[in-house]
Image (cartoon, rainbow, N blue to C red):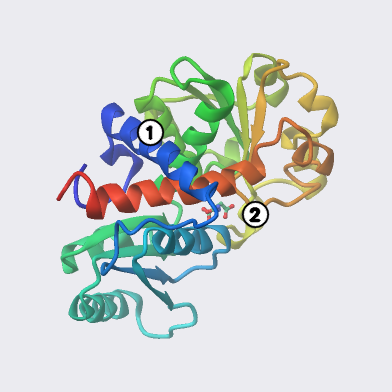
Amino acid sequence: MSRHLLSAADLDADEATAVLDTAAEMANVAGREVKKLPTLRGRTVVNLFYEDSTRTRISFEAAAKRLSADVINFSAKGSSVAKGESLKDTALTLQAMGADAVVIRHGASGAPHRLADWVDGSVINAGDGTHEHPTQALLDAYTMRARLGRLAGLKVAIVGDVLHSRVARSNVLLLHTLGAHVTLVAPPTLLPVGVGAWPADTSFDLDAVLPSSDVVMMLRVQRERMGDSFFPSVREYSRRYGLDGARMRQLPAHAIVMHPGPMIRGMEIAPEVADSPRSTITEQVTNGVSVRMAVLYLLLGGMNQ
Ligand code: NCD
C-alpha cells in the first residue's frame, strides 16, 4: 500500500482485499471485553475536520484509540482564514507536532492531495467535497462481503444524488476493482457530466433496476451542495427515486439495502425500509470502525514497517 489513502483508486484488488481481510481480524477485537490493541502505541493520529461529520469522525477516533494511538481532534469548522493559506499553515503545524497520520475531511475536492504534499505522515481522505470518500467505500464493500459472501459479480445499484456524492464515486472505483457491477440510478440532473467514462452503467428508472440488484445503496440528496432546480419537488423526487416498502419488495429475496448516513427518512428512504432486516445501515457504522482500524494499521504499522 502507498503511504496515503486519497482515492479508492489508490488500491488494487489485492490491496483492497488485504484491507477487508485485516478489518475482519480487527472486528474480533470489537467483540472482546477489552477492545484495544497496542499496535500504534506512541503514534499520533490527527483528525482534521473542516466539514460536519458524525459517523466518520467518531469512527476514525474510535479506530485510532482501539489501536492505542494518541488522537488529536482538530475541528477546523468556522475558520475564516482563506482556505488554501489556512490549510497550508495548519499542515505545517501538524508537521511540527509530528503527526504520523492526518485524517482530513474538507469541503474542497482535492484538499487531501494538497495536504499530502506538505506533511511527512500518512494522509487519509475522510471526504473531500464532491470527490471521494475511500474509507466509506471500503466499509461498504466489507459490509456487502459480510452479508452476501462475495463481491465479484455482485450487481450494485447506487441511487440518488450521484452528482454531489463522494460516496458514489469511491464506491464505483472500488467495486469495479473488486469485480462488482455498478448501475448508477438518478434523474439526469443529478448525474455528473462525464459519467459515461466511469466504470458503471447508468439508468433513470429505479423500478427497472431493482429486480436484478443484489445491493441497493441509497444516497442522501445533498441540499447543502446545491441551489434550487435540481428536481421539481421533494415529493416528486421521492415518488421516482425514493425506496419505499413496495419498491423494496421488488428486490430479490437475498438483496440488501445500504445507506452511508445521514439519511433523510421519508425522502430517499422510507422508515419501513431503513428499519427492515434487509437494511445494513447500523452494520455499516459498526464495520466502519474495523475498516478504519485496518487502514490505520496498514498505513502506519503494517506493511510499511
Ligand atoms: C456521507 C459523506 O459525508 O460523504 N456520509 C458519511 O460519510 N457517512 C454522505 C452524506 O453526507 O450524505
Label 2 within 8 A of ligand 1 by Cβ: yes
Q: Reply above or below: 222 against 183.
A: below
Q: Residue at x 35, y 41 (%)?
A: 8
Q: Point out residue 84 in the picture as x, y percentages from the top left corner.
A: 29, 74
Dividing the picture into quadrants, the one containing residue 259 is top right
What is the number of callouts on the image?
A: 2
The kind of secondary structure element at disc 2 is: loop
Q: Which residue is mark 2?
A: 262
The kind of secondary structure element at disc 1 is: helix
Q: Nearer the viewer, residue 240 or 101?
A: 101
Q: Reply above or below: 39 against 269.
A: below
- How many C-alpha atoms fall within 10 Å of the one at disc 1: few (<14), some, or many (≥20)? some
Q: Which residue is mark 1?
A: 21
Asked whether residue 199 is in view, the answer is: yes
Label 1 within 8 A of ligand 1 by Cβ: no
Q: Residue at x 44, y 37 (%)?
A: 24
**Image quarter hosting the N terminus:** top left
Q: Extreme front residue here?
A: 33
**Amino acid type for the residue under numbered disc 1:** Asp
Q: Nearer the viewer, residue 55 or 223?
A: 55
Q: Residue at x 62, y 51 (%)?
A: 261
Q: Are marks 1 and 2 in contact (CB under 8 Å)?
A: no
- How many C-alpha atoms fall within 10 Å of the one at disc 2: few (<14), some, or many (≥20)? few
**Amino acid type for the residue under numbered disc 2:** Pro
